[in-house]
Structure formats: structure tokens, C-alpha cells
């Protein structure tokens, strides 16, 4: 029988405190980016803000207040904006793949065309003091915002977005085998386990119910510098 012991549906959870750093356009918030193979969802728990999104249908601002549940599909460029201490529980598809590689920042095209330049612009200095790492995270946010605003202002936004999607796909292509393994261990295994359970129930076999367990865990890391803010992450 297929086994799976992760969170329901192969998702991952993190707690997010959105960056309150001012940006060039006068707003405060995180780094615009896109996921290519994962949906992402927000459950707003505190404060107030918005998620700015850019898709083939255009630019949209979705207000976020406590109790809001918002989600979006792969290909959605998104940027979280903090207006008053915005805090969110984030649900990520495929075992947290968005924080484990499935994220391409909206850097200007010259960075997207060169994998080494992209890596240099987006990496945080390993082993550096927290303030230095925060400065690097803020610098990459500002660079991504530059590219994001250019996409929004392009004479043909649809073609500019399509070109960005193509460049993003080229950047991540070398990592697709690794991503497929994570999907197979997580979301696919969870779906296969459910299918087998349904088959058993159809036959009157309830043996799997005697194998039930309860699990709980605390964050494995607090205050990680993520793309949108400070993250409390679960292993």
C-alpha cells in the first residue's frame, strides 16, 4: 500500500510576516516573483495589506485582511504589500517547492538571460551577519521591483509577460528532475495513498484505519529571509 505521512495533500505550511521595507514606488512589502509549477495560498491572520498580481489578464490588487483566504495558480507574478503589520499563514503546493526552488524573481531581462548573473543577484551571503543578509534581501527585492514595474509599463504587457515566462522556464529547466522527485514523494504519493484507501473501503477493508497516528511539530526555523517577508518554516 502507498504510504504518505506529510501534511494533507502534500502541501507545506509557513508563517509569514511581510516585509515592511519601503520601496521605490512608495509601497512597503516583498519581492515580486512567479512560481512555474505550484499554486500558493494565503490565510491572513493579522494586520492589513494586499497582494498585487500580474497575469495575462492584467494587473490586479487583492485586499488582504484577517480571515481572507486568497490563492493563485502557477504563472501569477505576485507581490505582497504591507499596510499594517500583515501576517499570513502560507500554504504551498508540492511540499513547499515554492520556497525550495520554484520561484523566479522578476529581475530585469539582462539578469534573466544569464543564469550566473541571476544567481549572483538573488543569493544571500552565506554566513554573513543578519544585517548584511537583510540588506542583500532588500537589494534583490528592489531589483525585482524594477523588473516588475517595467513589465507592467511595457507597450505590450502580454508579450512582455510571455517573454518573462519563457526566460523563467529556461532558468529552472536544470532543476526539473529534482522538482519531480519532490512531487513524487509528496503530492503524488498523497493522491496515490487516497486512491488505495478508497479501493480498500470499496471492498470493506478498513485495516488502514487501525494505522492512524497523530503528529505535531513546531517551526524548525524562525525569521528566515524569504521572498515576501520573514518566515517561520516547518521541516
Image (cartoon, rainbow, N blue to C red):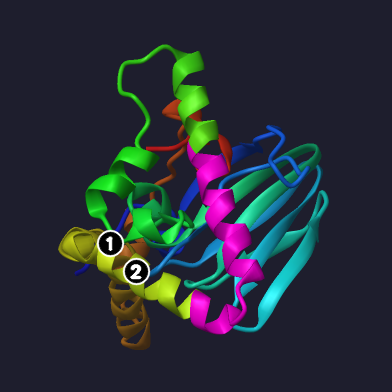
Quadrant containing the N terminus is bottom left
Q: Position of residue 41 (x, y in %)?
A: 59, 60
Callout 2: helix, strand or loop?
Answer: helix
Label 1 crowd (10 A; few <14 / some 14-19 / many >=20): some
Task: Name the residue: 51% across, 34% down.
Answer: 139
134 vs 26, left or right, is: left
Quadrant containing the C terminus is top left
Residue 218 seen in this snapshot: no
Between 4 and 232, the one lying in front of the other is 232
Task: Name the residue: 76% across, 44% down.
Answer: 27
55 vs 45, left or right, is: left
Residue position for label 2: 167
Task: Establish if 163 lies above or below 226.
Answer: below
Task: Name the residue: 66% across, 69% down.
Answer: 153
Task: Name the residue: 49% across, 57% down.
Answer: 106
Main secondary structure found in the magenta portion: helix
Label 2 crowd (10 A; few <14 / some 14-19 / many >=20): some
The part of the chain drawn in magenta is 140-160
Q: Are marks 2 and 1 in contact (CB under 8 Å)?
A: yes
Residue 165 seen in this snapshot: yes
Q: Position of residue 209 (x, y in %)?
A: 37, 63
Q: Is residue 122 magenta?
A: no
Task: Establish if 169 lies above or below 24.
Answer: below
Residue position for label 1: 171
CA gap between label 2 and label 1 equals 6 Å
Between 77 and 152, the one lying in front of the other is 152
Amino acid at each position: 500500500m502507498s504510504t504518505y505521512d506529510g501534511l494533507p495533500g502534500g502541501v507545506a505550511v509557513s508563517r509569514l510576516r511581510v516585509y515592511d521595507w519601503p520601496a521605490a514606488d512608495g509601497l512597503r512589502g516583498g519581492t515580486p516573483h512567479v512560481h512555474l509549477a505550484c499554486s500558493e495560498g494565503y490565510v491572513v491572520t493579522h494586520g492589513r495589506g494586499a497582494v498585487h498580481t500580474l497575469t495575462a489578464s492584467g494587473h490586479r490588487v487583492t485586499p488582504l485582511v484577517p480571515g481572507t483566504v486568497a490563492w493563485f495558480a502557477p504563472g501569477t507574478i505576485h507581490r505582497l504589500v504591507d499596510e499594517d503589520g500583515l501576517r499570513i499563514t502560507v500554504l504551498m503546493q508540492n511540499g513547499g517547492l515554492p520556497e525550495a526552488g520554484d520561484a523566479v524573481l522578476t529581475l530585469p531581462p539582462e539578469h534573466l538571460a544569464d543564469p550566473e548573473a541571476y544567481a549572483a543577484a538573488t543569493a544571500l551571503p552565506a554566513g554573513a551577519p543578519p544585517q548584511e543578509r537583510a540588506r542583500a534581501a532588500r537589494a534583490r527585492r528592489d531589483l525585482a521591483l524594477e523588473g516588475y514595474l517595467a513589465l507592467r509599463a511595457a507597450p505590450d504587457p502580454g508579450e512582455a509577460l510571455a517573454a518573462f515566462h519563457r526566460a523563467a522556464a529556461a532558468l529552472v529547466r536544470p532543476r526539473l528532475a529534482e522538482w519531480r522527485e519532490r512531487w513524487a514523494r509528496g503530492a503524488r504519493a498523497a493522491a496515490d495513498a487516497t486512491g488505495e484507501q478508497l479501493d480498500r473501503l470499496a471492498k470493506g477493508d478498513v485495516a488502514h484505519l487501525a494505522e492512524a497516528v497523530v503528529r505535531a511539530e513546531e517551526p524548525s526555523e524562525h525569521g528566515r529571509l524569504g521572498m515576501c517577508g520573514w518566515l517561520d518554516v516547518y521541516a
